[in-house]
Image (spheres, grey):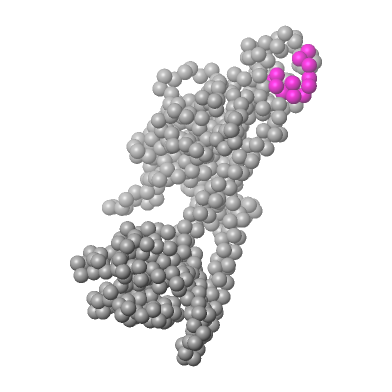
């Protein structure tokens, strides 16, 4: 597949598992764990698709998403948000702010792979 | 409307209550008449509310019927009546046919034990609903819980993804396998710690939730027990507060004790500014009319209202029963002295039409009104909204409204300006009231 995905996630063990998983699926995976500097990293790497956790140190994933949608360069960047189960407000807000899909933790690996493929292909709204 | 109560005055039903009580005791009319030395035909007129009674005859009848005289003249406590009305409405909404709300007095007369039980259950339900609301609110806004849940879910997500890889990748390189095993071990340790912390948090919440009474309720119980009058503080001032507190064993926690101290300190300050002997003598001379007594308080209307509510009832000066309600600027009731036949709710807010809330909109303007309650009872209310705490240049004052209540006698002339009010939307039967919150508490 060869597409580049940036995974903004501060939980190192989640990052390692997803990174391994997506690499096996053919993705070129980069990671970043700080919300405060995520926008600069996105601008620097210019990924094809973004996986963005909501709760990040330094800055919320929702705030980052809002800024992404407000900038012409990243307004159409496909974004898959990761939220925690039970945080329905986060999910609703993520979709309202322009997330292409969301996954609730804990998610299954197959869900992650399939959802990311779908988001990268069409960017249509989806979620679990 | 099926659940609308008959708007009759409680006092006019004395005869009905005598009849109901007599029938409940399976006593013949002639036997009761003989016991109180009147004719059976006169008792019949009394029982059909065609003759008013009072004085010795009322006391004799009450004794013969083995009830308190007030039970015959006032019927059941207004709060209990309101609770029964609310229970009836709630039952009708949930389970179908409405209860006979126009026969509540009759029910209380015939089955006082069962009536009290229903009322207590309704109070318990209201208390539990308030506790559930409080716990829901605590769960929704508890940052410790939110953080703990996020921690647990993140850990579970890492374990799920990692273990899935280990199971589904039998040919995983040894380096990756070792790393994922290490990650699993770390996450399992982390999950154990966060789950333990979460349980400890819930245990703490549970321990707090076991005591349903709030500090405000505990303090109110202390004041009720003392009749809202503390002779030691009247005599010795604030120096007597520790002794008063030491006597009270019902304050379960530091919050309740601290709140009690604050209320008693205000009581002591009030007593120092308006000493008992002076206010009692002056008030007795003018039939305890706050309007006439205003100059005594040097313009501090709220002080006067609080002091009248703190007078020892009865006694040589025949101090009447006063009720008191105090709310903060948000309208939340922070203190109350209950008065028979006028429900001041413990939870939520009272009737939006009470002068208490009207005063909030007109700070520093004393207000007074005659209040008509749904059951026909009438009260005179005096209210004012004043700043509390020290004043400061450029500082926003913190406002508080105070309302004093006094029952009007049965034969008091009708007031054309009387305001129809209720006990608060939660239990008010005035379905068509424009000030009614949609559905009320139980809607």
Q: Residue furthest front?
A: A1
Q: Residue at x 54, y 25 (%)?
A: B2
Expressed as whole percent of the image width and height from the top left, the position of residue B191 reads 53, 75
Q: Position of residue B161 (x, y in %)?
A: 47, 76
Q: Is residue B146 above or below residue B220?
A: below
A14 sits left or right of B89 in the view = left
Q: Residue at 74%, 21% (x, y): give it.
A: B22
Q: Is residue B21 left or right of residue B436?
A: right
Name the one closer to the observer, B87 or B310: B87
Q: Is residue A105 left or right of residue A42?
A: right
From where the camera sits, is residue B194 visible? yes
Q: For this rendering, which residue is in front, B158 or B176?
A: B176
Q: Which residues are magenta?
A: B18-30
Which residue appears at 63% of the width and 11% of the height? B50
Asked if residue B19 lies in the magenta stretch, the reply is yes
Residue B27 image position (x, y, % from top left): 78, 19
- Residue B12, compared with residue B254, is above or below; it is above
């Amino acid at each position: 597949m060869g597409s580049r995905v940036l995974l903004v996630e501060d939980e190192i063990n989640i990052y390692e598992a997803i990174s391994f998983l997506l690499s096996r699926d053919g993705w070129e995976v980069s990671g970043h764990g700080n919300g405060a500097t995520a926008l600069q990293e996105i601008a620097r790497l210019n990924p094809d698709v973004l996986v963005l956790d909501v709760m990040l140190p330094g800055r919320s994933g929702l705030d980052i998403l809002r800024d992404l949608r407000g900038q012409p360069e990243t307004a159409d960047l496909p974004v898959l948000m990761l939220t925690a189960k039970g945080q329905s407000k986060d999910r609703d807000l993520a979709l309202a702010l322009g997330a292409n899909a969301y996954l609730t933790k804990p998610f299954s690996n197959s869900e992650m792979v399939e959802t990311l493929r779908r988001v990268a292909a069409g960017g249509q709204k989806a979620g679990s | 409307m099926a659940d609308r109560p008959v708007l009759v005055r409680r006092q006019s039903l004395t005869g009905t209550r005598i009849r109901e009580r007599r029938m409940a005791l399976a006593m013949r009319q002639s036997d009761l008449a003989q016991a109180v030395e009147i004719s059976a035909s006169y008792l019949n007129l009394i029982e059909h509310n065609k003759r008013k009674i009072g004085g010795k005859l009322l006391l004799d009848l009450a004794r013969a019927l083995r009830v308190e005289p007030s039970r015959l003249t006032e019927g059941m406590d207004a709060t209990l009546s309101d609770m029964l009305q609310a229970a009836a409405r709630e039952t009708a909404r949930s389970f179908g046919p409405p209860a006979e709300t126009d026969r509540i007095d009759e029910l209380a007369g015939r089955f006082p034990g069962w009536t009290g039980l229903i009322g207590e259950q309704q109070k318990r339900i209201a208390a539990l609903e308030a506790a559930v609301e409080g716990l829901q609110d605590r769960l929704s806004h508890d940052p410790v819980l939110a953080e703990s849940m996020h921690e647990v879910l993140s850990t579970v997500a890492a374990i799920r993804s990692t273990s899935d890889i280990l199971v589904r990748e039998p040919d995983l390189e040894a380096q990756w396998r070792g790393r994922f095993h290490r990650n699993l071990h770390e996450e399992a340790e982390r999950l154990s710690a966060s789950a333990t912390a979460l349980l400890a948090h819930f245990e703490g919440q549970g321990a707090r939730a076991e005591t349903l009474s709030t500090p405000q309720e505990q303090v109110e119980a202390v004041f009720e027990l003392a009749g809202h009058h503390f002779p030691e503080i009247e005599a010795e001032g604030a120096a007597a507060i520790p002794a008063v507190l030491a006597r009270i064993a019902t304050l379960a926690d530091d919050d309740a004790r601290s709140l009690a101290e604050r209320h008693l300190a205000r009581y002591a300050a009030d007593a120092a500014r308006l000493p008992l002997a002076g206010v009692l003598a002056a008030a007795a001379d003018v039939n305890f009319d706050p309007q006439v007594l205003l100059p005594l308080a040097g313009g501090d209307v709220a002080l006067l209202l609080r002091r009248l509510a703190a007078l020892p009832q009865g006694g040589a000066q025949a101090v009447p029963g006063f009720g008191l309600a105090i709310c903060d600027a948000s309208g939340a009731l922070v203190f109350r002295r209950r008065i028979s036949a006028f429900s001041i709710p413990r939870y939520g807010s009272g009737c939006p039409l009470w002068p208490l809330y009207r005063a909030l909109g007109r700070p520093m303007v004393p207000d007074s009104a005659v209040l008509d309650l749904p059951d026909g009872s009438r009260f005179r209310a005096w209210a004012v909204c004043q700043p509390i705490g020290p004043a400061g240049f450029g500082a926003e004052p913190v406002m508080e409204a105070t309302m004093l209540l006094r029952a009007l006698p049965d034969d008091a002339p009708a007031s054309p300006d009387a305001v129809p009010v209720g006990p608060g939307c939660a239990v008010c039967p005035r379905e068509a009231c424009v000030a009614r919150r949609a559905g009320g508490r139980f809607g």
